[in-house]
Image (tube, helix red, strand yellow):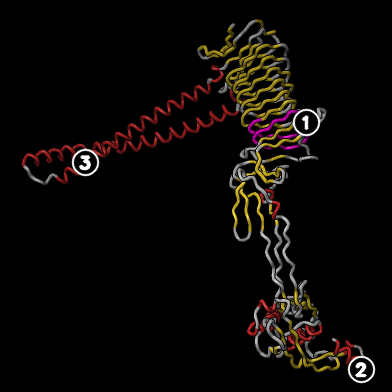
Amino acid sequence: MADLLQTANAQGIPADDLDFDLLSYETYFKGTIDEDWQNLRDCILLDRTTESEIRSKIFIIRQEYQIRIHEYKAHPYLDLRFSLATDKSKSKVVAIIEPSSKIPLKKGVQEWLKEAIRAKMLRHEFLVGLYDGNLDREINRLLLKIQKEGPLSAHYKLPIGEFFPPVLPIDDKIILHFKQNKESKSFIEGVQPGELIFEYIFPKHGRDGRGCDGSFIEVPEPKVKYASYIVINEETIYSEEDASSIRFYASVSGFVERKKGTFTVSQELHIESASFKKTGSIETGLEKEISLKIKRNESNEDSIGSGVTIDVQKLDVSGTVGGNSKIQACEVNIGAQTHRNSHINVTEVANIHLHRGNLTAKEANIDILESGKVEADIVRVKKMVGGELTAREIHIDILYSNARITALESITIGTIEGEGNKLIIDPHSIECYQDKISALEIDIRDKVSRIQMESKEFANRQLSFKEKNSRIKQIQQRVINAQKNGTESMKADLIRLQQYKIEAETLKKSHEDIKLSEEHLIALKDELNKLYAADLHAVVTHHGIYNGKNRIVFIDPKTRQEYGITPEGKVTHIRLRQEGDEKKILLES
């Protein structure tokens, strides 16, 4: 460009009015042991030196060009409008051709394009002939595209080449795998034994590069920040190392935390409260052995805030559970109260002081139930005011008013001090009862079908065997005669007799299997009939005095017919008894 400007100034014309032709060029370099410039001539650079030397700081490369400067004249056929683009280090060059370019499919167009591209490279001080070995191939691809598809309709990127791009260093880092690819936004993340929880990536040196303009590209040293930060509790975390990283795995289930600078997998978390503002939801799953203890010092705020979701193995809450909160756990202990819109699902035992929300559990122990709902296998309540209970077995110390209590087997109440209560024995309201009924009905249908098929097969095989009886007797007689005469012709007959014997034993075994299946079918039907008679096996027990203002109802599980009574006075047990074709309520004092 300096030569073009000098010529333009000497001629008194703008530099844009000048153009040039590249007549020839030569490449020179100096390496580690070179005192003088080395002429590359027609050799490939890597035939005269090494990649390491080219990438080194001491390596120098230059080119000299012989050019003919002349007044700019538009090409008679080619109108190539394009710009050059490079990466940040100028180690890669691309020509971006505008769709307004006119590229004729004429003889010699390849050379015209190549000359235009190299001329612009020289104007931008890029070396030529060192890294653009694929330029001819890329130009042919462009021309083939135009031949097949017509003139360009969008900008076209034509790769020119790359010299020696720098290889960037890798800084050390820690990848927290247990926090990646998690759909939930839980306050803590649960991990399982053997799960990859985090990884330390070793720092790695890069490589210096060489730009397309011949300049040296220096690459910085990798940054090392985290090597001294990783200290683990070897009782809960173990590690594996290779050339690129150290991977850390959980040896127990729990959640990952850092205590006094040491990474560990803990199983017990203590917090003051759970809320959207402070913690968000806490969802780790029941399969991870995590115990959450929430102890709030301020009694005027919820320990578990409104709308928060908790999913842990064990939960201990000293305070209250807010509205629209959702709790999933194996075991739950709540020292205060649950809001009426809260939802709690417990796979084992739930212990609650004051319950107003919705609870599902295997076993529920509640001090005070106020208008709350409970579904469980066994429920024990000290005081109940309103609300609904549904369980296989229910125990209430003191029952006040307006409660609905539904059981499968038994309702036991110490004292009733209110009215408007409804005590119901309704097996079909209990989910486990319905599941048993459905499972038994399916088993019975399958068993009946199997017995019918096996009985039919047995009958056919038995008939066939009977038809062979006469032949069996003939063979037996031949064997006896052969033994008397001392001949050896009975060998085949003995084999046939053995086969008949095996067939007889198989028939006998099939008959025994059918009998066992029939006995099993009878047992299944007996069990089903017993379930259908669940209302007859249930009992309502009251250890106080009925005031005549509370209703007792038994519901037939097959017919859904109701048998009700409003008892008065001393009645300890109330049952349903079968009398002929009818069922009647039986009162026992």
Rendering coords of residue 374 (x, y %): 67, 25
- Residue at image position (71%, 39%) is 282
Q: Earlier in the sequence, mark 2 or mark 1?
A: 2
Q: Which residue is mark 2?
A: 10
Rendering coords of residue 322 (x, y %): 77, 31
Q: Nearer the viewer, mark 1 or mark 3?
A: 1
**Dot 1: few (<14), some (14–19), or many (≥20) neighbours within 10 Å?**
some
**Dot 2: few (<14), some (14–19), or many (≥20) neighbours within 10 Å?**
few
The amino acid type, in three-letter code, at marker 1 is Arg
**Dot 3: few (<14), some (14–19), or many (≥20) neighbours within 10 Å?**
few
Rendering coords of residue 331 (x, y %): 64, 31
Residue segment shown in magenta:
303-331
- Spatial separation of the CA atoms under disc 2 and disc 1: 89 Å
| Total count of labels | 3
Residue in the foreground of this view, choosing between 379 and 466 = 379
Rendering coords of residue 501 (x, y %): 23, 38
Q: Which residue is mark 3?
A: 498
Residue in the foreground of this view, choosing between 65 and 428 = 65
Q: Which residue is mark 1?
A: 296
- Spatial separation of the CA atoms under disc 2 and disc 3: 123 Å
The amino acid type, in three-letter code, at marker 3 is Gln
The amino acid type, in three-letter code, at marker 2 is Ala
Q: Secondary structure at mark 2?
A: helix
